[in-house]
């Protein structure tokens, strides 16, 4: 009897099975990617795309570098300020690294007004992360507006300036959140790098996760309220600088474009 596994027909069947398996895998990957994208709510715009669209007519401020030419990355911190934020600010000042801070209103901005002022005075971008970390997609329009507007006003009372950026808790947004953000003059900023620092106190692991995911035009998400995060930052900065990265704020990452209110941005 002929061994079909070695016959021409057997070989063709094996190739066909492998092709079907590969196609199925690619289909599942595409579905997973689409699902991940749809979970953000509104399709995001990449900083590199918005820079290109601005051409030479944009009004965004470059800071110390033009990210159209330099290898830029943005370091961002959520849900503070907190007890470890002074140490973090000392590190950023020593390393000459600007960052973007998405602040919580109720138990952070109100509790640490001197730190909020220091953030602004030292050239960091002060941004909005809601009042209570409420999941905005679960709230009514009035509740969404209150979560954002109360934090806007609290920050303005301290710094004299309302934020122009916000980050929705858990990255969850939708058309209604977008509409309210546009009304309040807030762009929505997501991320491309996360160390999941809420799940570990291991500073070395936090550093490794960031370094492994870092890429040009990336936006790093960390939290200055967790024990392992602030100690990890010096190593993150050192490693990324050694790899040729320049740290910028989120608006500097998009220059010469200016982030548009309501638009969702993610690398």
Image (cartoon, rainbow, N blue to C red):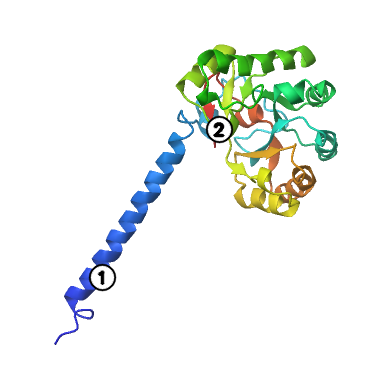
- Residue 111 screen position, x and y as percent: 80, 23
> Mark 2 = which residue?
171
> Which of the two discs, 2 and 1, sits closer to the camera?
2
Q: Quick check: 85 above or below 184? A: below
- Residue 240 screen position, x and y as percent: 70, 48
Disc 2 crowd rating (10 Å Cα; few below 14, some 14-19, many 20+) is some
> Mark 1 = which residue?
14
* Residue toward you, 45 or 146: 146
Quarter of the figure that contains the C terminus:
top right
Q: Quick check: 33 above or below 38? A: below
- Picture residue at 43% right of the left edge, 43% below the top: 33
- Picture residue at 67% right of the left edge, 18% below the top: 163
Residue 2 visible, this angle: yes
Find numbered disc 2 in the image and state the secondary structure of the residue it sits on.
Answer: helix
> Marks 2 and 1, Cα distance to the nearest angstrom?
43 Å
Find numbered disc 1 in the image and state the secondary structure of the residue it sits on.
Answer: helix
Residue at the extreme bottom of the image, as rendered: 1
């Amino acid at each position: 009897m002929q061994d079909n596994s070695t016959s021409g027909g057997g070989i063709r069947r094996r190739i066909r099975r492998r092709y079907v398996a590969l196609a199925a895998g690619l289909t599942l990957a595409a579905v997973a990617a689409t699902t991940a994208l749809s979970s953000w709510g509104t399709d995001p715009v990449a900083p590199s795309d918005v820079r290109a669209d601005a051409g030479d007519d944009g009004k965004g401020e470059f800071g110390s570098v033009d990210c159209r030419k330099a290898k830029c990355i943005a370091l961002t911190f959520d849900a503070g300020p907190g007890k470890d934020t002074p140490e973090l600010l000392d590190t950023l000042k020593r390393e000459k690294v600007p960052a973007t801070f998405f602040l919580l209103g109720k138990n952070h901005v109100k509790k640490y007004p001197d730190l909020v002022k220091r953030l602004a005075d030292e050239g960091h971008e002060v941004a909005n992360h809601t009042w209570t970390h409420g999941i905005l997609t679960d709230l009514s329009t009035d509740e969404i507006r209150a979560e954002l507007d109360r934090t806007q006003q609290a920050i303005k009372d301290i710094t004299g300036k309302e934020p122009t950026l916000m980050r929705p808790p858990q990255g969850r947004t939708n058309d209604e959140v977008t509409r309210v953000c546009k009304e309040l003059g807030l762009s929505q900023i997501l991320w491309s790098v996360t160390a999941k620092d809420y799940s570990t106190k291991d500073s070395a692991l936090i550093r490794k996760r960031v370094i492994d995911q870092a890429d040009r035009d990336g936006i790093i998400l960390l939290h200055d309220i967790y024990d392992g995060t602030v100690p990890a930052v010096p190593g993150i900065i050192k490693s990324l600088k050694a790899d040729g990265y320049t740290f910028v704020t989120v608006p500097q990452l998009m220059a010469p474009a200016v982030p548009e209110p309501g638009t969702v941005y993610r690398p």
